């Protein structure tokens, strides 16, 4: 493996200017630093103040699996508020001041700029060189690659969230329903439940995105995994009939009353409560909800009573039920300029050990292979682990490749689609127009 020569590496200044304001970077470990402080060959990490899991995992690794790497290049960390994250990364990248490792940009488009500008390390090549490319779960790896629109990997999935329909096993069994494998199965199940006086879906229409997630998933199942990339590339439009059909299909669920009354007034917490109190049979949500599912105070139906079904196939569609909707939370990237033997040693041990430490110590499901899961892993977490291990690939969410304005327009109008005040065509026109404006 060819690496850069050893050199002194400076830690990110503790004070950096952002436009007309200033933002202090507080050190996670150790005493105060001034803006001339530098590391003596340490391995530097920059994270968001609000996220403590990644740094806690790195610190655990430094004392165990990564001890040799930490002895050669001690872990040194800073954190800044997530509210200014992308702006701060832009500034640091422009000054060649990125840390050895940091959380990736929150906006995929900004990450693409870093990739094009040679700011971040090609991890596909680096992991191959180290012989640890098999330490990433295939579905998680494909999610990161799809997110940044490049064939190679430029960030590591410190989280991996899958999405699908969680369901109340007892309610389905009582009504003679099996986990749906096709869209028609899902619609038929919803009709049976409604006729029996059971609300089919718990849905946070007020938040919008749980509704638009369904639109995106339907598009992927009907038109294929590259359908929304075609929209981003300008090769298709959301107003094309086959895309409108997806929005119409979701709108029909609302028109039939399957989302319940006043879906536009139901927020995230209310929809979670509907499902966990046994008042709704299905709940489309990501695996980040495991914390709620595994909380006995919140979960009145019992964790053992919760099943998981992938978003179903659409008859005649080009997509596959094996392509699981997913996201990677906030992945981490390595600076290309800083990569040397010390960074390589850290990268190798992170690839080998991160998955086990994150799951065992923080209960976080990552995109890394887990060799030794805890013996008392909750049933719902086991489901997620098995789904991740068995999913060959993944797809993104509806707004993943949209402009910020289009994302807002989409989610703000999700309730209108769910309650029937907007047709599928009207909804797609609004979102496409916002995308066209850039």
Image (cartoon, rainbow, N blue to C red):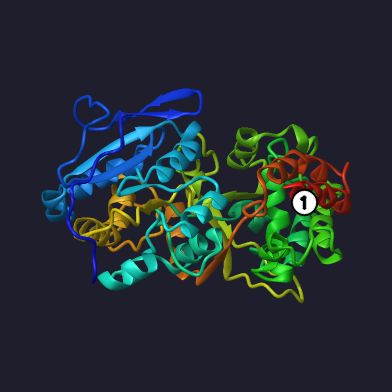
The one nearer the camera, 253 or 212, is 212
In the orientation shown, which residue stands out farthest toward the front?
Answer: 95
On screen, residue 152 above or below 53: below
Is 328 on the left-hand or right-hand side of 12? Answer: right
- Dot 1, crowdedness within 10 Å: few (<14), some or many (≥20)? some
Position of 298 relative to 376 (above/below)? above
Identify the residue at image location x=68%, y=39%.
Answer: 204
- Relative depth, front residue between 174 and 146: 146
Quarter of the image where one finds residue 191: bottom right
Q: Position of residue 1 (x, y in %)?
A: 23, 72
The percent position of residue 377, horizontal first and vertical second, equals 36, 52
Residue in the image at 52% along x and 66% along y: 150
Instruction: From the viewer's side, name the closer residue of 281 and 121.
Output: 121
Q: Where is residue 113 drawn, in percent x and y?
A: 52, 53
For disc 1, the marked residue is: 436
Quick check: 415 above or below 286? above
SS for callout 1: helix
Residue pictured at 74% horizontal, 74% vertical: 317
**Is residue 294 depicted above or below 158 in this figure?**
above
Q: Nearer the viewer, residue 15 or 333?
A: 15
Locate residue 314, reporting x and y percent: 74, 69
* Total number of numbered discs in the rendering: 1
Query: Can residue 187 be spotted in the picture?
Result: yes
Asked whether the viewer can see residue 176, the reply is no
Name the residue located 30 percent from the left edge and 33 percent from the top edge.
Answer: 13
């Amino acid at each position: 493996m060819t690496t850069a020569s050893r050199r002194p590496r400076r830690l990110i200044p503790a004070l950096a200017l952002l436009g007309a304001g200033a933002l202090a970077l507080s050190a996670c470990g150790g005493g105060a630093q001034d803006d001339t402080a530098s590391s003596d060959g340490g391995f530097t990490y920059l994270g968001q103040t609000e996220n403590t899991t990644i740094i806690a995992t790195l610190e655990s690794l430094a004392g165990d699996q990564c001890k040799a790497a930490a002895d050669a290049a001690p872990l040194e960390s800073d954190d800044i508020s997530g509210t200014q994250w992308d702006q701060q990364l832009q500034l640091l990248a422009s000054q060649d001041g990125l840390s050895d490792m940091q959380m990736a940009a929150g906006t995929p488009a900004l990450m693409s700029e870093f990739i094009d500008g040679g700011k971040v390390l090609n991890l596909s090549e680096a992991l191959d060189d180290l012989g640890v490319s098999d330490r990433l779960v295939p579905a998680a790896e494909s999610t990161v690659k799809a997110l940044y629109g490049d064939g190679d990997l430029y960030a590591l999935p410190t989280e991996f969230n899958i999405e699908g329909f969680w369901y109340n096993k007892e309610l389905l069994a009582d009504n003679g329903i099996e986990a749906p494998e096709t869209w028609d199965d899902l619609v038929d199940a919803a009709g049976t439940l409604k006729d029996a006086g059971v609300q089919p879906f718990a849905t946070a229409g007020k938040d919008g995105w749980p509704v638009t997630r369904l639109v995106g998933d339907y598009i992927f199942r009907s038109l294929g995994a590259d359908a929304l990339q075609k929209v981003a590339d300008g090769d298709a439009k959301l107003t094309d009939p086959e895309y409108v059909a997806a929005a119409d299909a979701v709108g029909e669920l609302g028109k039939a009353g399957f989302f319940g009354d006043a879906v536009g007034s139901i927020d995230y917490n209310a929809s979670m409560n509907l499902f966990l109190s046994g008042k709704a049979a299905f709940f489309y949500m990501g695996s980040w909800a495991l914390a709620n599912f595994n909380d006995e105070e919140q979960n009145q139906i019992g964790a053992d009573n919760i099943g998981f079904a992938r978003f179903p196939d659409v008859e005649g569609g080009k997509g596959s039920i094996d392509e699981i909707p997913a996201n990677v939370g906030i992945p981490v990237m390595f600076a290309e300029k800083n990569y040397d033997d010390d960074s390589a040693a850290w990268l190798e041990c992170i690839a080998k050990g991160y998955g086990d430490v994150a799951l065992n110590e923080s209960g976080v499901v990552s995109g890394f292979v887990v060799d030794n899961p805890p013996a008392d892993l909750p049933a719902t977490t086991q489901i997620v682990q098995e789904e991740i291990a068995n999913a060959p690939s993944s797809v993104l969410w509806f707004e993943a490749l949209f402009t910020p304005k289009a994302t807002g327009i989409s989610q703000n109008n999700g309730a209108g689609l769910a309650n029937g005040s907007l047709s599928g065509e009207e909804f797609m026109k609004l979102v496409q127009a916002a995308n066209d404006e850039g």
